[in-house]
Image (tube, rainbow, N blue to C red):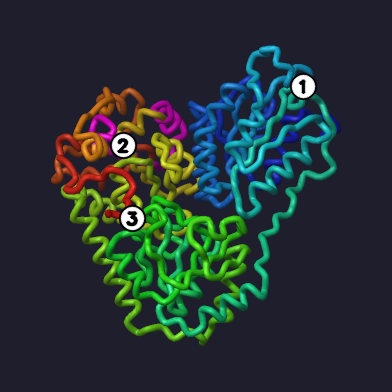
Amino acid sequence: MSDKVTGGEVVAALLERAGVTAAFGVISIHNMPILDAFGRRNRIRFVPARSEGGAVNMADAFTRVSGGMGVALSSTGTAAGNTCGAMVEAETAGTPMLHITGQIELPYLDKSRGYIHEARDQLGMLRAVSKAAYRVWSADTLAGTMREAIRVARTPPTGPVSVEIPIDIQEGAMTWPADLEPLPVHAPEPAADALDALARALEGKRRPLLWLGGGARGAAEEVARLVERGFGVVSSVQGRGIVPEDHPQTLGAFNATPEIEQFYATCDAMLVVGSRLRGNETLRYTLKLPRPLYQIDADPTQQGRAYTADLFVAGDAAKSLAVLAERLAGKIKIDPKFAADLAAARKAAEASLRAGLGPYAELVDALHAAMPRGSVWVRDVTVSNSTWGNRMLRVHGPRDGVHALGGGIGQGVPMAIGAALAADERKTVVLAGDGGLHVSLGELATLVQEKPNVTLIVMNDRGYGVIRNIQDAKFDGRRYFVDLHTPDMGELARTLGLQFFRAKSTGEIPSAVKAAVAHRGPALLEIDMNAIGPFAAKFAGPPVRKS
């Protein structure tokens, strides 16, 4: 390597040393030195998204599926602002990704002169939507700031981190930093006495249940050891697949139905691992969970946030569960009826949900039959996802499911692109509504250009279906602003060069699904809901306890 390089090349080299293999973004005059280095070095795949928000969604999903680190690049000012919604999603999910944004030249920065591309307090804006946000102030601080940003993103509790790099630092000449290696990441150590107390509390339990959240995704082996000892399992949406959802001892993400709440009443302990017990999955915190309730979390501030824990252990999930599994060996005598009762509760919850699907139970069955085991299942926020997509279609690995956790629509397509690039040869299937599809319509061009192995299922009811249902339930059926002009999906696909399939009746669903999933590369499958008909039960927002 020569003695002098640009700041952009140093950024590229730092990312390579950190194991980054893919980055997503929109090229701009305020990130060109970095992307020029990407192109010349040819070690990081760059995906040109059509929007900055889409780029962050792609990097987010890439990170969730790969277990590595995705990177999103944006320009400054308006472009950095465009990332914020997707950054909120990544922050909600605790995704350890990196957002690199440009900034105007240092001599003009923070002078409030109306300099083009500047945003007032851009760093403050990014701090509000990131785990942390940093500004590089000089060539000398570039490597240290980047290394610290990567370390902070990866340190539990993980989250997205933003870094501003002024354009004159990106394109300026500098010497190679003495050290490009990533800083060590230390998972929080659980206190030995806290684990001793938890092990003693669980000894002798006959019907213990684990509630697994996203913070337990790196602890699949340790969870499996507790399952071998007889623990039952239920998961949050973010914790799906830590135990394969066809395992007989898991309830999957059936976590808040009446049938499951009745089963909870028969359990004699619950251990919550890496979950916030979010309101939409606990009937706004009124779900009656088993007692005593114990909790393990890398974030000490989660103690008592949603439910009061009888015992709380602050520490890494994998480290904590490894010790716990060892100390409980031979000390738990499981009720012989526990596994059968758990299976019966899940069967009852599935049957209740299936009864409300009406004709769309056919779609669930067709996807079960068509999707190979290990497929990646991506979901945008739509009626179908909120009813069956988050529960009935089974996920078999801790990184095989991606969901717009923060509840924002329109993120499914870009998430599917990032997920599919991380999944490599495996099939990725994404479920979206036509309303959500409109939000990121431009990313269909990215889908076609990058050619990932994605089947996009669009549930097309020509409007905002869930909002219609809420208006029917809460506003006496007055429907305003919910009907959308929706393009002909077939013509849209043809214009883009996207393989197209359509189902307009229940009889057409199995063959259409089979063909769309079998197609190698990007494909769009339209489910014509207006032709097929409504669900048997209306979904009108997250479930709440009925008075």
**Looking at this rendering, what residue extends furthest in the front direction?**
547
Q: Earlier in the sequence, mark 2 or mark 3?
A: 3
Nearer the observer, 492 or 189: 189
Q: Are marks 2 and 1 in contact (CB under 8 Å)?
A: no
Q: Which mark is residue 391?
A: 3
Q: Residue tagged by mark 1?
A: 106
Name the spot of residue 436 as percent of width and height, x first. 36, 33
Q: Earlier in the sequence, mark 3 or mark 1?
A: 1
Marks 2 and 1, Cα distance to the nearest angstrom?
44 Å
Q: Are marks 2 and 3 in contact (CB under 8 Å)?
A: no
Label 3: how many Cα within 10 Å (few below 14, some 14–19, many 20+)? many
- Residue 45 visible at all: no
- Residue 278 visible at all: yes
The stretch in magenta equals: 441-468
Q: Residue tagged by mark 2?
A: 433
Q: Are marks 3 and 1 in contact (CB under 8 Å)?
A: no
Residue 445 part of the magenta segment: yes
Name the spot of residue 471 as percent of width and height, x first. 25, 35
Task: For mark 3, give the secondary structure.
Answer: loop
Label 2: how many Cα within 10 Å (few below 14, some 14–19, many 20+)? many
The disc labelled 2 sits on which kind of residue?
Answer: Gly
The disc labelled 1 sits on which kind of residue?
Answer: Leu
Please name the residue shown 64% across and 13% down the image: 116
Residue 115 horizontal side relative to residue 510, left or right:
right
